[in-house]
Image (cartoon, coloured by chain):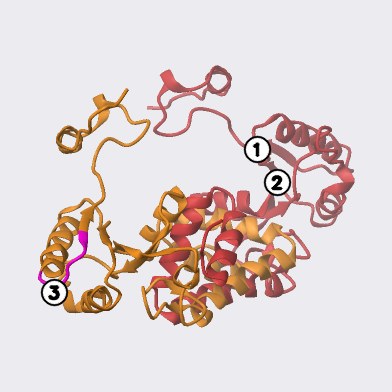
Chain colours: A red, B orange
Amino acid sequence: MLKYAAPLQKLVEELEKLPGIGPKSAQRLAFFLLSRPDDEVEALGEAVLALKSQISLCSRCHNYTTGELCPICEDPHRDASAICVVEQASDLMALERSGEYQGVYHVLGGALSPVADIKPSDLYVSDLLERVRQVEPREVILATSPTVEGDATAEYLRQLIAQLPEPPQVTRIALGLPVGGDLDYADQVTVARALRGRTRMEG
Amino acid sequence: MLKYAAPLQKLVEELEKLPGIGPKSAQRLAFFLLSRPDDEVEALGEAVLALKSQISLCSRCHNYTTGELCPICEDPHRDASAICVVEQASDLMALERSGEYQGVYHVLGGALSPVADIKPSDLYVSDLLERVRQVEPREVILATSPTVEGDATAEYLRQLIAQLPEPPQVTRIALGLPVGGDLDYADQVTVARALRGRTRMEG
């Protein structure tokens, strides 16, 4: 129906497949790119093409990497005696942004879900157990999301790790009110968790 | 500071340059692309690269095209005796989406602006006058945006066209309340324009 030039139409269609980008945003982005200098648009196109051809999974933690190991596993300043278990590499990046964590990671590749038929064998669970057995870390931090699936995955991993010959300490990230959040607007489950997880104030 | 794999970092940086896409959206899009099949990501990359190399401006109306003329100028079913003048090709697409207009277009490439130092010589103004003189259309519809710049540009064009030997009818798109909009929420200038532009109801 629309009379776009074919390459413009094609780009709009491809952009529409991205999450959170509807027909109008896709068109706006395509017209924006048309108005930019050639080299800027080429840089974006090349970056998209390079993505899948140059990136693979870290053989140790399954984070994204261009080499055998990811930048975090390769960094000698990171504390290898703490392993933080996350569902996705994007969760790992959220933790990195906090600047709070100096240990290493293990990316599961998802969470257990009977509904979506995701079983332990679909995730990097046996890798994790093997790694914990070999490395013998001081602590394993379970940082799967505070959802039904993430909680179930954390509990499943806790049980498996507890069965190891010399199990490390297993912890779960804290649940509570988001910083800057208003108690009045928080959902009741979060408020209940925040109360249950209350800590002593020291003066 | 962040430990992205280099190609991922590069893509996030390129995506952040797009309008309406902040650091978080850029990261979300990059991780989404990583999770997609190779051919889908390649299709996006190729579409971005094809954009600037394959698209140029229509020699008649300055809409985007892959050939000498744009699909609208080439379409024999369009009414060449009505020329609708818009600021940008994206405005043209907005009018096309309405399905209301069967004439042809003229893209100015912007609006006059003393602040941004955009003069008539920076726009396709002389092209428009030459085209009107040659084609002798029945009507020229001024569909520049209802902004200070767009209104000034429309008034400027109206005066120029009126000085032609056999001037066509010159019209301006209607201003008023948006369909589905609430009178109570409309700004006072829009309400004033809607009142001034009121039309007789026929029963």
Badge 3 density bin: few <14, some 14–19, many ≥20, Cα 10 Å: few
Instruction: Please tell me whether mark 1 or mark 3 is closer to you in this view.
Output: 3
Question: What type of secondary structure mainly makes up the magenta span?
Answer: loop
B127 versus B34 height, above or below: below
Magenta range is B163-169
Q: Mark 1 points at which residue?
A: A145
Residue at (12% x, 65% y) in the render: B156
Residue A41 image offset from top left, x and y in percent: 48, 75
Question: Label 2 crowding class (10 Å Cα cut-off): few <14, some 14-19, many 20+?
Answer: many
Q: Which residue type does callout 1 highlight? A: Ser
Q: Does the magenta stretch include residue B166?
A: yes
Mark 1 lies on a secondary structure that is loop
Kind of residue indicated by mark 3: Pro
Alpha-carbon span between mark 3 and mark 2: 73 Å
Residue B57 lies, in percent from the top left, at 41, 78
Q: Do the residues labelled 1 and 2 touch (CB within 8 Å)?
A: yes
Same chain check for tags 1 and 3 = no
Residue behind mark 2: A87
